[in-house]
Image: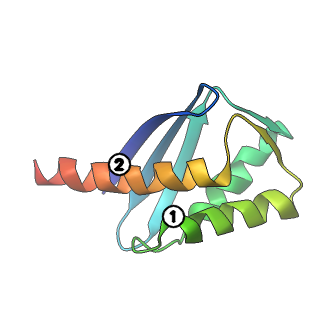
Amino acid sequence: MEGTARQKVPGGKLLIVKLRYGSRIEGAQILGDFFLHPEESLKDIEDSLVGISYDANEEEIARVVGAVMDRERIEAIGITPEAIANSVKQAMKNGMESNRA
């Protein structure tokens, strides 16, 4: 399945998460008007989402994203691990709803 979520993160930054998933996340793309340093670190965050269970809650997802951000010393302006986790769960929900339609 595929799902997409869009949200304005507090502070006004746009965050878009696109997922391919089944029982686990198979692929993730994160887009928006936020800033990361180093810029190429976005791939590390996207890769950290692959393999996460559909049943994982937002706290678990935020821990995974936060851990890679800490390990890789990624500085984020305009997004947080919690915002990414929220969008991941919303993308899954949106994907399920569009699949039923």
Residue at (68, 31) in percent of width and height: 34
Q: Is residue 54 rendered to the left or right of residue 93?
A: right
Q: Nearer the viewer, residue 99 or 84?
A: 84
In 3D space, how far apart are the residues under numbered discs 1 and 2 (Cα atoms)? 16 Å
Residue at (35, 68) in percent of width and height: 22
Query: Which amino acid type is marked by label 2?
Result: Gly
Residues at badges 1 and 2 in contact (C-beta under 8 Å)? no
Q: Is residue 88 rendered to the left or right of residue 43?
A: left
Q: Is residue 84 rendered to the left or right of residue 94?
A: right
Q: Nearer the viewer, residue 95 or 47?
A: 95
Residue 5 in the image: x percent, y percent?
A: 41, 41
**Residue identified by numbered label 1:** 58
Q: Earlier in the sequence, mark 1 or mark 2?
A: 2
Residue 72 vertical position relative to residue 15 in the rendered view, above or below: below
**Residue identified by numbered label 2:** 3
Q: Is residue 77 rendered to the left or right of residue 71?
A: left
Residue 30 in the image: x percent, y percent?
A: 57, 42
Residue 8 in the image: x percent, y percent?
A: 52, 31
> Farthest residue toward the left?
101
Q: Looking at the image, is mark 1 or mark 2 nearer the viewer?
A: 1
Query: Which amino acid type is marked by label 1?
Result: Glu
